[in-house]
Each structure stands twice: as structure tokens, then as C-alpha cells.
Amino acid sequence: VEMTSNIMGQIIQTLQYLLSHHYFRKTNNCDDTVADDRNGQISEGNLNKNCNGNTLQFVYRWMDALTKCGRFHLNIEFLNEEQKKCINLIFGVLEQEITKSEREFLLCWEADDIVRLKSLYVCS
């Protein structure tokens, strides 16, 4: 599937907005809740971490899927500065999460996957 650089840029901006809105928010609004195994209760911390893990996986999978679109490398060259900044912000969060010494939710990738994916988004 091919897409224009404008569409790709808008998807990247949307993913960055989702990540910043969902990942850093302090409220307990999340549809994907998981009960704490110890007492069957959902604590505020568990709820936010579960939301964050799902959001991180969603953003990672989209960023990976975009690399498989036709004209990907050409589209990357035509992204504007704001869209390129969004890419850096997205990978900043993904790298920060994967390098935490104690991850409290299961992520679907390893540190090498982030490095590989980020290298595809580098403009020449």
C-alpha cells in the first residue's frame, strides 16, 4: 500500500498526540483494565501502567507498519520539521520505556527492535 508523505506525517503526528495524551495522563480512564493478582483489585498504579503498556504497543506497531508502506523512504524525506520532531518524541518515549531496569508491564519488543525501527526513520 502506498501513501503520500502528508498522510504518513498526519499518522505520525496523531500517534505522538496519542502517546503524549494517553501515556502521561494521570486519570484512571481506560477500557483495558487488569485485576491485580494478589487481591483482585485494580489499583490506580496498575490501571495507568496497563493503559500505558497497551498504548506503547499500539504506537510501536503502527510505527513498524508504516515502514512497510510503499514509498516509505521517500515519504520520510518529505516530512516537515514538526512531523520529524514527533518521530523523535515517539522514539524518545519508546526508548525510555524499554531501558527501564524494572518494567512493570510486558512489552512486545526488545531494545534492539527499537534501534532497528528508529534507524529506518532517519532521513539522509
Image (cartoon, grey):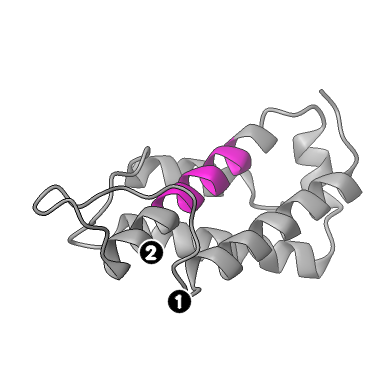
> What amino acid is labelled 1 in the image?
Lys
For label 1, count other residues whose C-alpha is less than 10 Å away and answer few (under 14), some (14-19) or many (20+). Answer: few
Q: Are marks 2 and 1 in contact (CB under 8 Å)?
A: yes
Q: Which residue is mark 1?
A: 26
**Taken as a whole, is the magenta stretch helix, strand or loop?**
helix
- Please tell me whether residue 41 is drawn above or below residue 76 in the rendered image: below
> Residue at the spot x=33%, y=42% of the render?
110
Evaluate whether residue 115 shows in this view: no
**Would residue 77 appear left or right of 96 to someone viewing this image?**
right
Span shown in magenta = 53-64
**Would residue 97 appear left or right of 16 to someone viewing this image?**
left
> Residue at the spot x=72%, y=53% of the render?
12
Residue 39 on image: x %, y %: 11, 54
Q: The residue tagged with tag 2: helix, strand or loop?
A: helix
Indicate the quadrant containing the N terminus: top left, top right, bottom left or bottom right: top right
> What amino acid is labelled 2 in the image?
Asn
